[in-house]
Amino acid sequence: MNAIYSTRANVRKPENYAAMSASRRTPNTISATDKTVHGFKRRIMSQIFSDQGLRVVEDRFIPRIDDFISLLWDSTENGRNGTKGEEEWGNPKEMASICSWLAFDIISDLSFGEHFNMLKSPELRWFPSVIQKLSQRVAIGIMQPNFTNLKIDRLFMASQLRDILNAGTWIRKRSELRACLGNDIKQKDLIYNMMNATDPKTGLSFTQKDLWLESIMLLTAGSDTTSAALSGAFFLLAHHPAALSRLAKELRMTFCNESEIRMGQQLNSCKFLQACINESLRLLPSVPNSAPRIVQEGGIQIDQEFIPAGITVGTCIYTLHRNPRHFSNPEEFRPERWLVRSRGQNAEGESISTNREGFCPFSHGPRSCVAWRLAWAEMNITIARTLFRYDIRLAPGLSCCGGARNDCQYLLKGFITAAVEGPWVQFRPARS
């Protein structure tokens, strides 16, 4: 990873990344291939997604998490299951969709000052499918730039492209409406922070077009990734009752009430929660494929191999996270591997630092995910509040559980981000 993605790595992003911007001429933070342009954008966005920046907007996204939790179980569903002892379990919920609605409601509220309300209304639930189409198009464009440069996508993805363009126009209007409000808002959002941030190195600020492009980037990159990570975590926890029970116990012993569960020292003390999230991100990374880089003049050295200029290189996160050099029994969901027992080792004598060397769910180096703190906060607070309020279980009769439960696989379709379905999970009010 260091040889390819570190600050001093002798590589550059390929021009193919232009496919990730809504503008062919103006890049966003992700698509910028020029290191100077990227550095400017990155320095501004880093201010917005710092710990201090997130605390400013925490009170905006926690109500969306509460909407999510309320949707998981309804008291009117009581008794519908009929079987004695089953009365309190609610109807099965398909977690990928619900987690997607949550992620979009959060990032839209933070980006535009008004959330899409997907958790409560079906009106805009078409939007996640468009983001998946965009992810497919961008993935093809990065691997074969002529697909977009020569506008071949207009031939082979005509209907998908029409949906993408319509969605882009719709987002642009929302962004412009929000920008017109300026600083005249009750609660600060990401647009507010972007409008008022300046680059400490150059003194420059974002233009109106920058605000629009970064808003679209946040909406796409900050939705699919978080929703896939959350639904993957619920899949793994529901398939491993011992870990689920231990985690629920930790949370219910740490907090007295649900409102206490927010960013801060108390949540950070929940080490098994963090271990479960790390292990989930290891097995089911939201961006499973490699991020390509082009070797520059002079070449680079990777594991004793010299790679000459002009060669495209990259590291696939999905396979890196399963490298036995870093993780023993890499296919097993074992959160304990992340818990330090003594002298930097876990209970089985494995080095935690060795684990971390092979763990890059948010990529690595100056091009790593700038909003990783937001994703981490969303996952911690959402999972903690859910398991504080509810017991959970897999819905009976799932097709994925035809064999041993531990052998079940959560299927990822890896485009730019991971496309997922399921799991089907049931909830009931927590029992002590």
Image (spheres, helix red, strand yellow):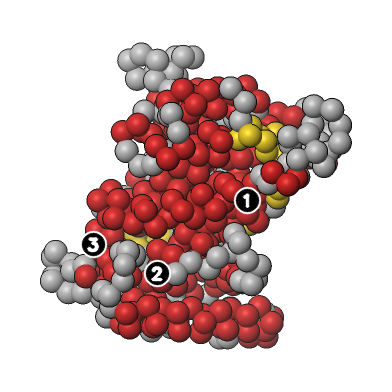
Amino acid identity at mark 2: Gly
Residue toward you, 241 or 405: 241
Q: Identify residue for label 2.
A: 113
Q: Nearer the viewer, mark 3 or mark 1?
A: 1
Q: Is residue 417 visible?
A: no
Badge 3: few (under 14), some or many (20 or more) residues near its Cα, within 10 Å? some
Which residue is depicted at the point 29% across and 55% down?
A: 56
In the image, residue 75 above or below residue 49: above
Helix, strand or loop at label 2? It is loop
Placement of the N terminus among the 4 image quadrants: top left
Instruction: Please state if 158 lies on the left or on the right of 268 as rendered.
Output: right
Residue toward you, 14 or 53: 53
Instruction: Please state if 184 lies on the left or on the right of 286 as rendered.
Output: left
| Sequence-earlier tag: 3 or 1 | 3
Quarter of the image for residue 92 reads top right
Amino acid identity at mark 3: Arg
Q: Identify residue for label 1.
A: 71
Q: Marks 2/3: CA distance?
A: 23 Å
Return the mark for residue 160.
none
Instruction: Please state if 197 lies on the left or on the right of 64 as rendered.
Output: left
Quarter of the image for residue 376 reads top left
Helix, strand or loop at label 1? It is helix
| Sequence-earlier tag: 1 or 2 | 1
Q: Pinpoint residue 202: horizontal percent, then vertical percent.
A: 13, 70
Q: Identify residue for label 3.
A: 43
Q: Marks 3/1: CA distance?
A: 38 Å
In the image, residue 182 above or below residue 429: below
Placement of the C terminus among the 4 image quadrants: top right
In the image, residue 196 above or below residue 276: below
Amino acid identity at mark 1: Leu
Q: Pinpoint residue 156: horizontal percent, then vertical percent.
A: 69, 80
